[in-house]
Image (cartoon, coloured by chain):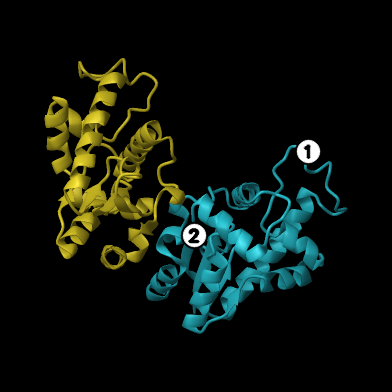
Chain colours: A yellow, B cyan
């Protein structure tokens, strides 16, 4: 039997992860986000730190490979990690209903599960405000932090799915959490489930 | 006072127009779709037939201009029509709450009205089935009719808004009507309004 699953793709700072957690709590099903890191680390043999940095990001600069500070940081190791992550996600989908945040789960589960595919986004101003509130300030300006994360998530998604990240066609529903508010997003998704 | 307006952008065959009409009927507000053609024709001086063909489509072939069968079919006349259409849409938004289907109304009303910006899409198979049911068969295969319309709507949207048609970021909500069903889409939009 196919379990009902919600996959949540999200822009950095859109609150997609919190929305996923709230939806899962309301529906009484597990939400996998950070948990996927430990599972993928175990499956692949890489460290959790490496998995965290590479599990849904592709460095996009031309010279990024040359200046990497990590010995096992190559396109090949990223492929190994992708396979491990994919295995973990497919196994979770077999286990039971759940919410899965990020990691191209929408694409991985396309033909394997009864999925509600969701994308959460918000305008740059609201996201900038949110990341400073949630993650604190850093030396890098919020606008640049947002642009960098978007760029590398987009590149990662494109590389492993062949599709355009954030294109409405990939999802059953996309929501502007900045405009609609997180609570409304949670309500709509619980209704749809 | 800003009136509350719903703009519906939609893929050809997704049923976005019907969803717009049903939402407007449930909310007891007018829905403007075909009506915009007569209004824009009156405003611009072009024939309704011309407006219908050019009001949200840009021919995309390299030689399309050379082989056009219409005497006033140039980028300049399309700009004139765009201005007329824009004026009509801005006036409608001043008049009162309503639903507006297509014609880049989401972009035109961006800074002028309290808008809920919606995009409706569906997968090619469901759309092909729908256009044959609704509009009947033609000599052109449904898949090609869909691809052609998408391409020219996308080019038109890009030309006049500078944004990518169908990109989730342009809309407050996007819905896969094929997967969720038209009724659910109508319900969600009425709730959000």
Tell me which residue sits at (67%, 70%) in the image.
Answer: B36
- Residue B103: image location, x then y, percent: 62, 62
Lower sequence index among marks 2 and 1: 1
In this rendering, would A133 be left or right of B54? left
Which residue is the site of mark 1?
Answer: B63
What's the mark number on residue B119? Answer: 2
Tell me which residue sits at (37%, 75%) in the image.
Answer: B191
The residue lying toward the viewer, choosing from A142 and B191, is: B191
The residue lying toward the viewer, choosing from B161 and A95, is: A95
- Residue A87: image location, x then y, percent: 22, 35
| Neighbourhood count class around disc 2 (C-alpha, 10 Å): few under 14, some 14–19, many 20 upward | many
One can see residue B187 in this view = yes
- Marks 2 and 1 sit apart, C-alpha to C-alpha, by 31 Å
Tell me which residue sits at (27%, 25%) in the image.
Answer: A78
Kind of element beneath mark 1:
loop
The residue lying toward the viewer, choosing from B141 and B190, is: B141
Q: Quadrant of residue A6?
A: bottom left
- In the rendered image of this protein, does residue A53 appear above or below residue A64? below
Q: Quadrant of residue A74?
A: top left
In this rendering, would A23 be left or right of B120? left
Q: Chain of mark 1?
A: B
- Residue A89: image location, x then y, percent: 22, 41
């Amino acid at each position: 039997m196919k379990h009902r699953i919600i996959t949540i793709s999200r822009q950095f700072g859109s609150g997609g992860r919190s929305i996923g957690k709230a939806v899962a709590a309301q529906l009484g099903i597990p939400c996998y986000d950070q948990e996927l890191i430990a599972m993928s680390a175990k499956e692949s043999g890489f460290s959790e730190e490496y998995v965290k940095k590479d599990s849904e990001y592709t460095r996009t600069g031309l010279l990024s490979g040359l200046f990497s500070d990590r010995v096992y940081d190559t396109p090949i190791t990223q492929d190994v990690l992708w396979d491990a992550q994919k295995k973990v996600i497919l196994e979770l989908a077999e286990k039971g209903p759940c919410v899965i945040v990020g990691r191209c789960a929408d694409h991985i589960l396309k033909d394997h599960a009864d999925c509600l595919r969701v994308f959460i986004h918000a305008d740059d101003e609201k996201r900038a405000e949110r990341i400073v509130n949630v993650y604190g300030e850093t030396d890098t300006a919020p606008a640049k932090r947002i642009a960098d994360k978007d760029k590398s998530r987009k590149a990662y998604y494109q590389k492993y799915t062949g599709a355009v990240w954030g294109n409405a066609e990939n999802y059953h529903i996309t929501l502007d959490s900045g405009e609609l508010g997180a609570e409304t997003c949670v309500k709509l998704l619980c209704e749809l489930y």
